[in-house]
Image (cartoon, rainbow, N blue to C red):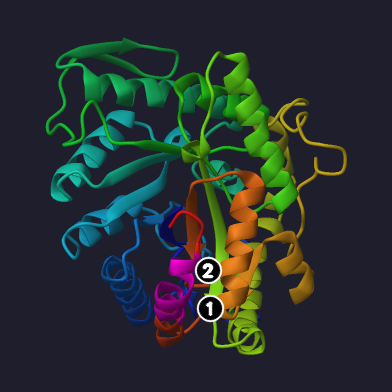
Amino acid sequence: MKVYNFDLLAYPEVPEDVPGTPVPSSYFDPPVGSRNYREHLDEMAYCEELGFEGVVFNEHHYSAYGTMPSPNLIAAALSQKTKHIKIGVLGNILPLRQHPVRVAEEYAMIDCLSEGRLIAGFVRGIPSEYLWYNVKPQESRGRFGEAFDVIMRAWTEPVWSYEGEFFQFENCAIWPRPVQQPHPPIWVAARSAESIEWCVKRKVPIAQVYQTNDQIEDTFNYYRKVAKDDGWESGPDKFVLCRHIYVGETDEQARAVAEPPLRYFFTLWNRGFNEAKTEIAVDQRKVKEAMVSARSASYFRPGNEERVNFHPMSWEQLIDTGFVIAGSPDTVARQVNQQMSQIGADHFMGMFHIGNLAHDKVIDSLNLFHKEVMPRLNGA
């Protein structure tokens, strides 16, 4: 089992009475934001001392839920604070990028700056981001596919051209090239049947987070089935699980520390994505409908098709569904091993910095995880 720290980099001080979507940017206090970036970067770099395989983070826009509109900047900064740990960006939102060559160039730069430690991730993004970036959701899959093809061509061909519906390039050659040849390892966040099938064709690992254990088991099993139908066997190295995690001295102490920042995190998630209180809520539903098809969730077992609303769940329900892994070192080791065994994954990403959890509490959890949990993980 390979262990990573996954970081959303949520903003820690959004008042309860803040307006709905979009949250006015006047609520972002630059000194607080600067401190938050510094603390998160320190936590990421500290994971190298603790023997983590890597640190991974993502891209979001217009939200306190995740304040990394350019995760590539975080990757570049982290490349200069570390020497060995892998740096994963999961990922750049390709349909929102007007020039995919810029993604190829920046990822190549990060791979050079880190001396070959980049994991290059690609995602489609969430509905509200399409509205705010003025990108047609109906074009999401087409733009993603073409952008990916452009990036692969830019990385693997010395001089290249491309002619597609959305992107056209002629007689190009990118500088620099990535250190890892022919290109850095690629991860994709995928849930729909169409996205899984796309990943299988390219033998790309997939990552999952906000589903129950049983739902993620269905998602990964569908990947295995499609791969088998395609003539190859997919091993656990093709699957990445991500979970909120906190390690305390006891189960009770872990809950006391981790539940309040998790509930805060839910307020950011709702306010950013799910509880838009303006006309954007109607538009968002239309975007969601445009981004999926009737068969997107067709592979799930009965009862697993619908996305789960975790926000109103009790602490016990959050643990039982797998959304949160928390407790004493014994409890956390057991939960991680059980989840990873059930879904058959090789890569585990823990979201150690939950919501507005204090920096020192994150460090405490990381230390206990390193000392007491990692030695007990299957295959670690």
Q: Residue 324 occupies which quadrant of the picture? A: bottom right
SS majority, magenta: helix
Q: Residue 291 occupies which quadrant of the picture? A: top right
Please give left or right for residue 351 compared with residue 263 in the image: left
Q: Is residue 207 above or below residue 4?
A: above
* Residue at 38% across, 81% down: 32
* Residue at 71% across, 38% down: 218
In-front residue for pair 103/361: 361
Give percent across and percent down for residue 171: 17, 12
Q: Residue 158 occupies which quadrant of the picture? A: top left
Please give left or right for residue 63 compared with residue 294 in the image: left
| Residue receiving disc 2 | 24
Type of amino acid under label 2: Pro
Q: Is residue 54 above or below residue 257?
A: above
| Lower position in the chain sequence, tag 2 or tag 1 | 2
| Tag of residue 247 | 1
Type of amino acid under label 1: Val
91 is within the stretch colored magenta: no
Q: Is residue 42 above or below residue 138?
A: below
What is the spatial separation of the Cα atoms under label 2 and label 1, in whole angstroms? Answer: 34 Å
Where does the magenta region start and end? 365-376
The crowding category of the residue bearing disc 1, from other C-alpha atoms within 10 Å (few below 14, some 14 to 19, many at least 20), is many
370 is within the stretch colored magenta: yes
SS under mark 1: strand
